[in-house]
Image: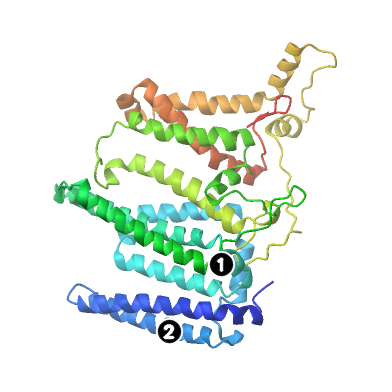
Amino acid sequence: MHSNGLFLQDVSGFLGVYYTSIALMNGVAAVLLWRNSQQKGGFLWSVIWAITACVMLVLASFALSGVAEMVPALPAVVRDIVNKLSGPVIYTVGTMVMLTVLFVFREFFVKPMVAWTGLNISLIVMGLSMADENFASIVMKADNVPIVGLVFMLAFFTWLATSQAVVNDRRIAQGLPPTEKLHDEKVLVWPDLVYTELICMIAVSAFLLLWAIYLRAPLEEPASSVKTPNPSKAPWYFLGLQEMLVYFDPWYAGVVLPSLVIFGLMAIPYLDFNKKGNGYYSISERKFSYIVFQFGFLELWITLIILGTFLRGPNWNFFGPFEYWSPYKVAVLNNVDLPQMFWVGLLDQPLPKSPAGSSGLMQAGYILLRESPGLILLGSYLVLLPPLLAVTVFRSFYSKMGLIRYLVMSNLMLLMLSLPLKMILRWTVNLKYLVSIPEFGLNF
């Protein structure tokens, strides 16, 4: 299903308001930059955003015309290419590459005009994409609209914090104190903080009231055991965990990993030996901590939430952004456990199996033999790798943290990395479980 005339007529009014809002946004930016044209490049950027505002008004007029052929939309060829190139592998690797580029070249991307350009490009592409019925049916769904807003808000606050960190890193490199130290003035909770919180509470309450009137909650019929939604999705903040169930057993993805996240956050104050960066933004002084946290938060949590919300459809299959969510889509899965790969695939032998009537101890021995490849691999990863890292890559960490704190930190980090590693093994060699012990319901 692609865009049709009736759908475009229905959505034309919304797109007209949408493009008009972008035009107004750029018009205000152009006026502000023109008033400060004495700054370097201010006049040129004001002209650029004034032209952008005019283009947006033209797109708005096309959309408001109500003629389906005039509504701006991404070409069908582009949508088809995006759908064909879409997949969990490209999505995950692509987001990882994007975040890496943003981190390495952060001094360039935190520039206000660069960030404003990126915002405009994302808004325009989103507007052109919403002219596609399949894309709009997901993005404009009542319970998905707040998530779209949260994505843009997260991008803004990440940019804001990163820009402040870049400024502080420059000042620190010049021997100057961070900007937070320049305004290190104590203020009273009453009335300064309380008044601010009260005003914010009133404003947010009014906004939510208007939101609830305009965008009604998508209430469905009462739950029934004979009719379940397809796809059955958890609340948006748990969609990252639901995505992990694709790669891990429920006991690990639903219990162990969340518990480790909570334990890891609790352990940070006791593991952190670097006292720099307290009370001010900085990346260069806490680069390792920054990279680990941003990787865990953005790549292993936020991107999984976006994936589960907008790209996982019926039967939990992956769908392209412009692909129709057909409940009849079939994804061929041929996942194999590591013991099957080792004994049957590599050695061309049947899986070790205890003889009939053997004792429980003998059965346990055969189970250990059968799972020995995975147990050896996991043991090497969790037991042998931390000491190896302590004498190589993390030598300075080990000397400053001591044995106990280092082991806790290294094992938490390795367990966090187990998620992307398991995802890679699933994509490359169709590995389902490293260790599979169905006799005890234990899989990893």
Observer able to see residue 146 = yes
Observer able to see residue 391 = no
Residue 196 image point, x, y percent? 27, 55
- For disc 1, the marked residue is 140
Q: Nearer the viewer, residue 168 or 342?
A: 168
Q: Is residue 230 left or right of residue 395?
A: right
Among the 4 quarters of the image, the one containing residue 312: bottom right
Type of amino acid under label 1: Met
Label 2 packing within 10 angstroms: few (<14), some (14-19), many (20+): many
State the residue at coordinates (74%, 51%): 332
Q: Nearer the viewer, residue 53 or 100?
A: 53
Residue 188 image point, x, y percent? 18, 47
Type of amino acid under label 2: Leu
Which quarter shows the C terminus?
Answer: top right
Q: Which mark is residue 31?
A: none
C-beta proximity under 8 Å, tags 1 and 2: no
Q: Which mark is residue 57?
A: 2
Q: Nearer the viewer, residue 4 or 296?
A: 4
State the residue at coordinates (47%, 78%): 17
State the residue at coordinates (56%, 54%): 307
Q: Please tell me whether residue 149 is drawn above or below residue 125 in the rendered image.
A: above
Q: Please tell me whether residue 364 is drawn above or below residue 312 in the rendered image.
A: above
Q: How is the image coloured?
A: rainbow
Among the 4 quarters of the image, the one containing residue 251: top right
Of helix, strand and loop, which one carries label 1?
Answer: loop
Q: Is residue 126 left or right of residue 250?
A: left
Of helix, strand and loop, which one carries label 2?
Answer: helix
Q: CA distance from mark 1 to mark 2?
A: 22 Å
Q: Is residue 384 left or right of residue 52?
A: right
Q: Disc 1 vs disc 2: which is toward the camera? A: 1
Q: Mark 1 or 2 closer to N-term?
A: 2
